Image (tube, rainbow, N blue to C red):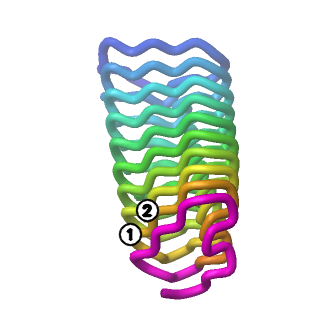
Amino acid sequence: MSNTGVPNTANGAVALQSNTTGSANTAIGPQALSLNTEGSGNTATGASALFANTMGNFNTAIGDEALFANTSSAQNTATGSAALASNTNGFGNTANGFLALLSNDTGNFNTATGDSALDGNTTGANNVATGQQALFSNTEGIRNTATGNSTLFANVMGDNNTAIGFGALQNNLRR
């Protein structure tokens, strides 16, 4: 395969192996950015980090399988093993912690900090979850803010909620 993208850095088995025109990428770890063809400005550190990325730009993935399924989405940051692992087309998300925003697929502009924060989110947007399992069950809810462990834990589709403190609104299902 011809690689015309420059400058790129790859260190690890099959890291950046499919790159054709993508430029300014850094891939460190086995299979990091392995399927990238045209994506530029990406940083992947960890086994299979940004593995499926083909055309996504300006993503940062640090941790094994962080942003694993990302294909064409841009401007996401995932720090932690499997953080944002299911994201395919979600844009502008930030996930910090083991399994943070794990199930996010197309949700945009979410911020999750903590072990399993916003774990179940698939399409929800503009949510902020800080703390272990904060907004854990949220799938479609939008504009929620949860600060503290297990806050808004059971919220699935509720919108515009604010919960502060350990377990606050833990059993809230809808607005």
Q: In the image, residue 93 lies at what x, y percent?
A: 42, 50
Q: Residue 53 appears at what percent x and percent y?
A: 47, 42
Can you say whether 8 is above or below 111 in the image? above
Q: Quadrant of residue 149?
A: bottom right
- For label 1, the residue is 143
Compared with 61, 133 (above or below) is below
SS class, disc 2: loop
Query: Is disc 2 surrounded by few (<14), some (14 to 19) or many (20+) residues within 10 Å?
Result: many
Residue at 61%, 74% in the rendered image: 169
At horizontal 46% and vertical 69% (from top left) the residue drawn is 162
Q: Position of residue 103 (x, y in %)?
A: 61, 61
**Residue nearest the observer in this picture, 131 or 102:** 131
Q: Nearer the viewer, residue 141 or 72?
A: 141
Most extreme residue toward the bottom is 174
Q: Residue 134: say if magenta.
A: no
Quadrant for the N terminus, please.
top left
Query: Which comes sooner in the sequence, label 2 or label 1?
Result: 2
Q: Is residue 156 above or below residue 80?
A: below
* Main secondary structure of the magenta stretch: loop
Q: State the extent of the magenta-drawn residues as a range.
A: 156-175
x and y, in percent, of residue 144 in the image: 44, 68
Disc 1 crowd rating (10 Å Cα; few below 14, some 14-19, many 20+) is some
| Quadrant of residue 39 within the rendered picture | top left
30, 3: nearer the viewer: 30
160 drawn magenta: yes
Name the kind of residue labelled 1 in the image. Arg
Residue at 48% x, 31% y is 18
Q: Which residue is mark 2?
A: 127
Q: Secondary structure at mark 1?
A: loop
Q: Is residue 62 visible?
A: yes
Q: Are marks 2 and 1 in contact (CB under 8 Å)?
A: yes
